[in-house]
Image: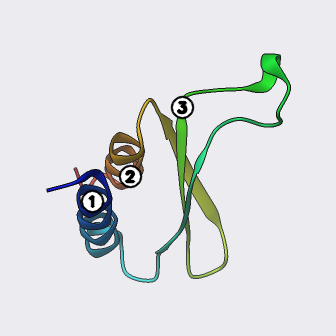
Amino acid sequence: MDDSQDLTRAWNEAQERLPVGWSLEGLRCASTSLSVEDRSDDWVAVATGPSREERSHRSDGPVSALEGLVASFGRA
């Protein structure tokens, strides 16, 4: 399986494991700008809830960011 298939599977599994009313909204690099001092190899996964509240998790890879986000709800 290639990286894109692994990431697709991880995304789908994370969405299924989120609490009712929560939805994955994004997965992005943690860099805040193109400046060298703002660059990061970390990833941030973001979900929003029923009242548009937001929860995120930062990790060293995209799959671990998704897994950490789910775990933050106590559903590891």
Q: Earlier in the sequence, mark 1 or mark 2?
A: 1
Outermost residue on the left side: it is 1
In this picture, is 61 found above or below 44? above
Drawn side of residue 8 relative to residue 25, left or right: left
Q: Nearer the viewer, mark 3 or mark 2?
A: 3
Classify 10 Å Cα crowding around label 1: few (below 14), some (14-19), many (20 and above): some
Q: Is 32 in front, or is 5?
A: 5
Q: Quadrant of residue 5?
A: bottom left
In this picture, is 38 found above or below 1? above
| x 14%, y 56%: residue | 1
Whether pointer 3 and pointer 1 mark residues with C-beta atoms closer than 8 Å, the reply is no
Q: Point out residue 15 in the picture as x, y percentages from the top left corner.
A: 34, 72
| x 85%, y 25%: residue | 35
Q: Nearer the viewer, mark 1 or mark 2?
A: 1
Classify 10 Å Cα crowding around label 3: few (below 14), some (14-19), many (20 and above): some
- Looking at the rendered structure, the secondary structure element under dot 3 is loop
- Looking at the rendered structure, the secondary structure element under dot 1 is helix
Numbered tag placed on residue 66 in the rendering: 2
Amino acid type indicated by mark 3: Asp
* Distance in Å between CA atoms under marks 3 and 2: 12 Å
- Looking at the rendered structure, the secondary structure element under dot 2 is helix
Q: Earlier in the sequence, mark 3 or mark 2?
A: 3
In this picture, is 31 found above or below 46? above
Q: Is 5 in front, or is 52?
A: 5
Amino acid type indicated by mark 1: Ala
* Distance in Å between CA atoms under marks 3 and 1: 17 Å
Disc 3: which residue: 42
